[in-house]
Image (cartoon, rainbow, N blue to C red):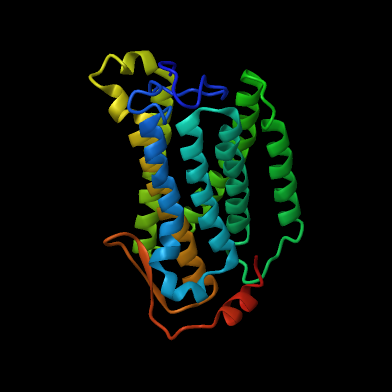
Amino acid sequence: MEGMTGYWGPPTATMDWCERNYIVTSYAAEFFNALTSMFIAVAGFLPILVHFRRRDCMEWRFIIAFLSVTVVGLGSVAFHGTLLFEYQRWDQVPMLWTVAIVLYVLFEQKHVKPTYRILPVALFAYAAVATLMTSERSGNKQWFSFHAFFGLATFLAVCKVTLFYRSLPSEMPELKKVMSHGFVALLVAISVWLMDLKLCDQLHMLPAYDYWNFHAWGWHLMVSCGLYNILVGIWYHRLKVVLEKDVSLRLSPIPHIVFVSPKHSATELRATSSST
């Protein structure tokens, strides 16, 4: 939301959120939005950190998926911190590629070896075209172009995750709980994102709304929780059901996978799945 002008100058991004600009420091356009974007970066890096000792059991598809979420978070920090169009692309372009990577994970989830040979090519082409179409500064056209490409891919991902959840057996209550928590978190995230976008003037009638705005403390926090839960749940299912590893899922202090059996070499696991 337009306010003072700081170190980065007038905003050139096609989006300016409800938090008033430069209210905390002249070096951060949307201080709280930039700060809470780190939740997303942490949500991507945390699964790798928590399971670092068993990274030999993490296929490249999941490593890339987790790291891509971290890149989205860091890009979001740059975007919200500057509100410059060049950094807006640092946020949006990784989002497009991340959802493409997640779609690959979902489509190949139940196959030990890659089955859909054309899938990586199709997803790469989609993400590349989306990147080109959304990287030109053109006001409302850029806004609608990005949300059309990202929204379509996200809708497909949500459908796949929903089908995946409905296929889970009752004998896996921990997994169903983790996935349902992820769903609820994403539903809350989308709801508060829309409220912050559509009801900005009304929300600013509330005391000190800039400091606890929904985009920062609602969208960023809840989407981080949702992505973490769902991706860890999908990874656990693949290890347990598809690759038949001796693992269990623990829900506290945060959802994480416990590896019961002796270590499998990275070569063995990745050769089994032959995935990238």
| Relative to 170, 86 lies left or right | right
Rendered position, 127 above or below 167:
above
Q: Nearer the viewer, residue 210 or 226?
A: 210
Number of disc labels: 0
Where does residue 51 sit, x and y in percent of width and height? 41, 69
Q: What residue lies at 35% left-to-right and 28% top-to-bottom?
A: 25
Where does residue 62 sit, x and y in percent of width and height? 54, 62
Determine the residue located farthest toward the left in the rendered image: 207
| Relative to 261, 66 lies left or right | right
Is the N terminus in the top left, top right, bottom left or bottom right quadrant? Answer: top left
Q: Is residue 171 visible?
A: no
Residue 219 figure quarter: top left
Q: Nearer the viewer, residue 2 or 243?
A: 2
Determine the residue located farthest toward the bottom in the rendered image: 262
Q: Is residue 273 visible?
A: yes
Where does residue 137 sit, x and y in percent of width and height? 66, 24
Residue 189 figure quarter: top left
Q: What residue lies at 46% left-to-right and 54% top-to-bottom?
A: 44
Rendered position, 35 above or below 165:
above
Where does residue 135 sit, x and y in percent of width and height? 68, 32
Q: What residue lies at 37% left-to-right and 39% top-to-bottom?
A: 35
Q: What residue lies at 64% left-to-right and 78% top-to-bottom?
A: 271
Is the C terminus in the top left, top right, bottom left or bottom right quadrant? Answer: bottom right
Rendered position, 214 above or below 41:
above
